[in-house]
Amino acid sequence: MQPDKSYPSPNGRYRLDIFSHEVRMSHWLDCPSLFDNNEGKYIFSTGQHWDASNVEWSDDSNVLKLDLRHYGQDYSQITITLELNKGKVFIHSNNRTVGVGSLSSVGAELSNTTEFRMLFF
């Protein structure tokens, strides 16, 4: 499956792919997945219920920031920061920042909306 949009990192190692899908009549979500070109695989994904916007790469390609909204929940927008050189993810919302873990574990955390709600809302 081809992404609908791609945002390559400045050094070309990573690529944030956006896969758009319709969830309801004329309502589309842009779901992000991060591809590591050196490893040849996706290393991070939020799943199909998070809509991404405002993608920002650091000049050295070590940090990726993006805004997310969860479809079907009453969550405010959150911002996630992926520190790729450290393999860490941070979530920022309601003037709080929480380090939720490694790149490999965060996708599962984001899909568990009950735990997520307890952290921020």
Image (cartoon, rainbow, N blue to C red):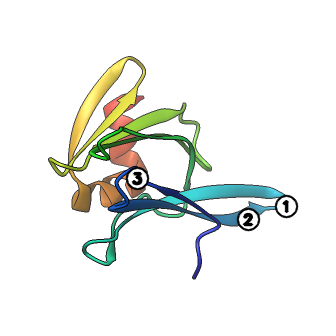
- Cα distance in 3D space between marks 3 and 2: 27 Å
Q: Is residue 111 left or right of residue 105?
A: right
Depth check, mark 3 against mark 2: the one in front is 3
- Residue 9's label in the rendered image is 3
Q: Is residue 17 above or below residue 85?
A: below
What secondary structure is found at the residue carrying circle 3? loop
* Residue furthest bottom in the image: 1
- Cα distance in 3D space between marks 2 and 1: 7 Å
The residue that mark 2 highlights is 22
- The amino acid type, in three-letter code, at marker 2 is Glu
Depth check, mark 3 against mark 1: the one in front is 3
- The amino acid type, in three-letter code, at marker 3 is Ser
Residue density around tag 1, few if under 14, some if 14–19, many if 20 or more, within 10 Å: few
Q: Position of residue 103 (x, y in %)?
A: 25, 56
Q: Is residue 49 above or below residue 58?
A: below
The residue that mark 1 highlights is 25
Split into 4 quadrants, where in the image is the N terminus? bottom right
Q: Residue at x 43, y 57 (%)?
A: 46
Of residues 105 and 54, the one nearer the viewer is: 54
Q: Are marks 2 and 1 in contact (CB under 8 Å)?
A: yes
Q: Position of residue 104 (x, y in %)?
A: 24, 62
Q: Is residue 97 above or below residue 114?
A: above
Q: Residue at x 37, y 54 (%)?
A: 112
